[in-house]
Image (spheres, helix red, strand yellow):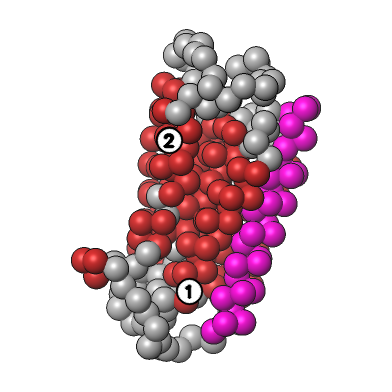
């Protein structure tokens, strides 16, 4: 289990940071606009998840170290929303993002709808049993998809001028996926495909957004940062 946990965490983080670097020839391309290069990391995650799905061992394994929080929930039940919460907190703190608040909210709602619809559809179609046998909604991981959707939004909005943000956001998202495997709720393949769904949900939301609302300029409390004025 420890080996699988470390492997999954490393794999998710590698693909995520690779995605950020490939997308982000920051001085040339706007990651809010479609480019084929942005499909590389999600495609690699799906391919890896599909291959592993046919090779991983399927067995019920009850762990003795499953620590639940209040109301019978796991830590990742809350951590999955950390990137989304941080995105909102940065905005409220006055940290200027690529997209104004109104349009960013609209994009976030669209991303959530795409993410939920895709995850729900795949779970219903595949009916894959969870490792702990609790239900037949294992594939793909919704927790992981939510975390990666939020991490992708944070990277797009703040990653250009704050290089540490993609590492922190995707690190948290990778941790959520790893915890789902550690807590016997998902297989590795479920988490890899969930990460791909989350990344693509946010990217599709940005690619299809029309920016119909006029951006309102505000003061940035984080001084000494040069922002791209293009919208």
Identify the residue under disc 1.
181
In the rendered structure, find residue 150 and report the number of the disc placed on it. none
Residue 114: percent from the left, percent from the top? 43, 43
Q: Residue at x 72, y 52 (%)?
A: 18
The quadrant in which residue 160 appears is top right
Q: Is residue 111 above or below residue 175?
A: above
For the record, the magenta segment spans 1-29
Q: Earlier in the sequence, mark 1 or mark 2?
A: 2
Q: Residue at x 42, y 28 (%)?
A: 92
Residue 58: percent from the left, percent from the top? 49, 86
Distance (Cα) linking label 1 and label 2? 29 Å
Q: How many marks?
A: 2
Identify the residue under disc 2.
89
Q: Residue at x 42, y 55 (%)?
A: 80
Which quadrant does the N terminus fall into? bottom right
Q: Residue 24 magenta-drawn?
A: yes
Q: Residue 219 magenta-drawn?
A: no
Secondary structure type for disc 1: helix
């Amino acid at each position: 289990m420890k080996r699988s946990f470390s492997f999954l965490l490393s794999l998710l983080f590698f693909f995520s940071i690779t995605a950020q670097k490939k997308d982000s020839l920051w001085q040339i391309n706007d990651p809010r606009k479609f480019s084929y290069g942005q499909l590389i990391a999600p495609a690699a995650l799906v391919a890896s998840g599909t291959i592993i799905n046919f090779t991983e061992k399927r067995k019920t394994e009850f762990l003795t170290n499953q620590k639940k929080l209040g109301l019978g929930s796991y830590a990742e039940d809350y951590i999955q929303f950390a990137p989304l919460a941080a995105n909102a907190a940065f905005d409220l703190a006055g940290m200027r993002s690529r997209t104004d608040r109104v349009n960013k909210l609209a994009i976030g709602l669209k991303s959530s709808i795409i993410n939920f619809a895709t995850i729900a559809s795949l779970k219903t179609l595949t009916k894959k049993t969870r490792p702990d046998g609790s239900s037949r909604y294992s594939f793909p991981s919704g927790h992981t998809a939510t975390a990666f959707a939020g991490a992708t939004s944070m990277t797009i909005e703040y990653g250009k001028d704050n290089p540490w943000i993609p590492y922190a956001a995707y690190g948290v998202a990778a941790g959520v996926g790893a915890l789902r495997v550690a807590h016997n709720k998902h297989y590795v393949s479920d988490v890899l495909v969930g990460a791909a769904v989350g990344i693509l949900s946010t990217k599709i939301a940005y690619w299809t957004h029309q920016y119909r609302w006029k951006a309102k300029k505000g003061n940035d409390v984080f001084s000494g940062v040069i922002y791209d004025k293009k919208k």
